Image (cartoon, rainbow, N blue to C red):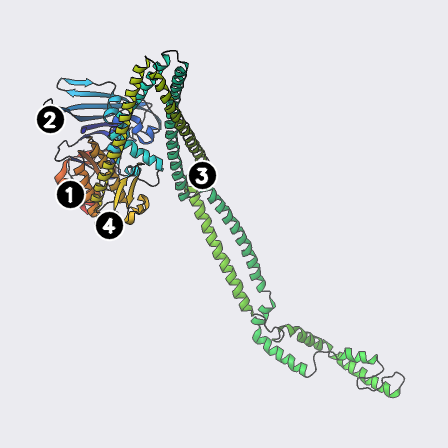
Amino acid sequence: MKLIRAEFQNFRLLRDLALVFSMDSEKNLTVIRAENETGKTTILNGLQWALYGDDALPGRGSDYRLHPIDWVASERTQIPISVQIEFEITTYRQKSKGGLIETNRRYRIIRSAHETLDGLKHSRTPSTVKLFQLTDRGSVPIEPPEAWISEELPPELREVFFTDGDRALSFIEATAPVRAKRERVEKAIHSLLGLGVIEDALKHVQKTTSEANKAARKIGTDEELVEIASKLEQIDKDSEELSEKIKDSKSQFALFDQKLSEIQKEIETVLIEGDREQLKRDIERTRQQLELLDKQQIDASKEHSNLFRNLFFSRDLLGAVLEKSLSKLDVLRDQGKIPSTTIPVLEERLKKPTCICGESLDLYDAESKQRRHHIQCLIDESRNSDALQRSITALYFGSNSLMQKEIAGAELWTDLYVKVANRRDELETLRDEQGKKLKALEVQLDSIPDTDIQGLRSVQRQYKNQRDRFNADWTRDETQLEGLKKDRKNLVLQRDNLLRQQKKGARILARLEVASDIEHVLKNSYDRMTNEELDKVSDLMNSIFLEMIGADPEQGAIIQKSEISNDFDILVYGPNERTLNPDRDLNGASRRALTLAFILALTKVSEVEAPNVIDTPLGMMSGFVKRSVLKTTIQKSSQLVLFLTRSEIADCEEILDEYAGQVITLTNPAHYPRMLVNDPQVKERKLLRCDCNHRQECGLCQRQVDVE
């Protein structure tokens, strides 16, 4: 198959776009030059939709709008949407005298649908598809078109012929479930190698065997033969049911395994942006921390205030004055004038019969009376100066707490102030940091999609349970099927022995033996083709891959080889046969090159002539690898359509000069004035095309980067 022309009407940005593809065998490359947001992926989706219907759209078409986004509904507007593709099929047949006769037939496929707008909502009618063969006499309808397309371009090969530069990694990406990757590779290989034909033949042979066994049950009156034939018939019926159940269980397992992988990615994406529940807990903890800091700040403020009532504040503030006053009080103390204890001591002595000096103070002794009189005079003299003495005495004793000897080892007030001030500053800083943290957490919470992470985890558990259930079902059914096969083998031997004893049984036995021989041949052919052709694809993939990345195993390259295992895993090896993980051990350029090498090798070995339509194949590539991948891909393809950005084209211009038979430039007018130099004078959201090649710019497609 080769693409000739495609026309798009009202398919998203493609309001009225027509594309012509190169049919030149020497210049087999068509380049569609388009920057990001310029409809490359939309064209890829449109081509696939035309051939395969809604199943080829993102999300199988669910909630996927086809009409231009700026189409406004006045009340209710019906929008006609269509994609039309003209293509050519080349067939060959053997001449009677040797050689091949080549026949080229042209076809046109048209898929259309209508979308109805109702406010901001839209609905779409089921798409209809029509297929015509184009002849000199006009267009001849082909019915049913879906069956014909499925025969020429099996749905399993959609990702082989129509490849998104990123989706291409689905054959090797480490994040995809192993079984899903294997199924993609296996389906692609089986479809391109035509193994489905052998599978259908095997089913037909098995049906023939079953019918012969039914006939064996009806001959003669041998009860044992009837019983064995009945058992075999039941085993065949049960085996077929089990095979279908196993197939369904495997399919369901792969489906839920894929869903599990997707929801795990969704959970990881949400968790990268932030876990709402965790953020809420963090916010609550931060608020509690803020409340504690607020309380500590209040306590520190009180402590700060109390410093100004502290005795040390007075001592340090009045230090110079106090030093003089305390010196004078010490002098008075040394003179014995303070503390003022005379009167109490003398009065106390008068109450006793003996003086301090030992003389008698007897009330009835004449000399004692004289002494008592003298003491009383001293008391009276002391009372005359009592007011001053009391003040001085109170001052002296009150100042003891301010004396250095009383406060030895105590901190200075300034030291206490520094500590309290530092504490307040630290609390203020912590309070400010926690306040900023709270605001940041609240902003982060507001920015997170309102996704129920717990709900996602619940769905994840459900998917896992479903996947594990289907895994258990198919394991159980496979065990039962193996048991039935053993029982069948024994019963067949018994049946054949009994048939040999029956006259009418010889004919049936011959049919069974022929069917068995054919089945044996078909199975051997199937296994041989699978193994031999798989080896061919594997070897060619390795050759193309190493050529693309410029790796020479003999020169000690890190990447030594690649292969497709018998389990349909695409593997890469480094030195010493060490398996390399594509996601961790290969760069983006090598990963894309590996997938493209697989697709090209598969197409080449199968000898299927079909276009390779690839969106942004040279992303993440530069230098030698980019040029090598481009040139190799061109050489290995019968028809190649590449969607390339200017950055992908850079440094590859001479390759395009040599191999590009058609170059089309697409422009999105919405990029003016930020990216486009000139105003396209178009208000609608639609793609515009010009015939500028990869080395040209015109007033429509000239971009700001071109004039810098």
Q: Determine which quarter of the picture holds residue 185.
A: top left
Locate the N terminus by quadrant: top left
CA–CA distance between discs 2 and 4? Answer: 45 Å
Q: Determine which quarter of the picture holds residue 641.
A: top left
Q: Are the two marked residues, 2 and 4, in contact with CB atoms closer than 8 angstroms?
A: no
Would you say 294 lies left or right of 76 here? right
Badge nearest the viewer, 2 or 4: 2
Secondary structure at badge 3 equals helix
Would you say 525 lies left or right of 345 here? left
Disc on the earlier residue, 2 or 3: 2
Residue kind at label 4, given as amino acid type? Ala
CA–CA distance between discs 3 and 4? Answer: 45 Å
Would you say 557 lies left or right of 414 here? left
Instruction: List the residue tagged with mark 3.
Output: 453
Q: Are the two marked residues, 2 and 3, in contact with CB atoms closer than 8 angstroms?
A: no
Residue kind at label 2, given as amino acid type? Gly
**Label 4: few (<14), some (14–19) or many (≥20) C-alpha neighbours in 10 Å:** some
Residue at x-position 45% and y-position 42%? 276
Secondary structure at badge 1 equals helix
Disc on the earlier residue, 2 or 4: 2
User: 707 or 633: which is nearer to us?
Assistant: 633
Badge nearest the viewer, 4 or 1: 4
Residue at x-position 35% and y-position 35%? 179
Secondary structure at badge 4 equals loop
Instruction: List the residue tagged with mark 2.
Output: 99
Badge nearest the viewer, 3 or 4: 4
CA–CA distance between discs 2 and 3? Answer: 66 Å
Disc on the earlier residue, 2 or 1: 2
Q: Are the two marked residues, 2 and 1, in contact with CB atoms closer than 8 angstroms?
A: no
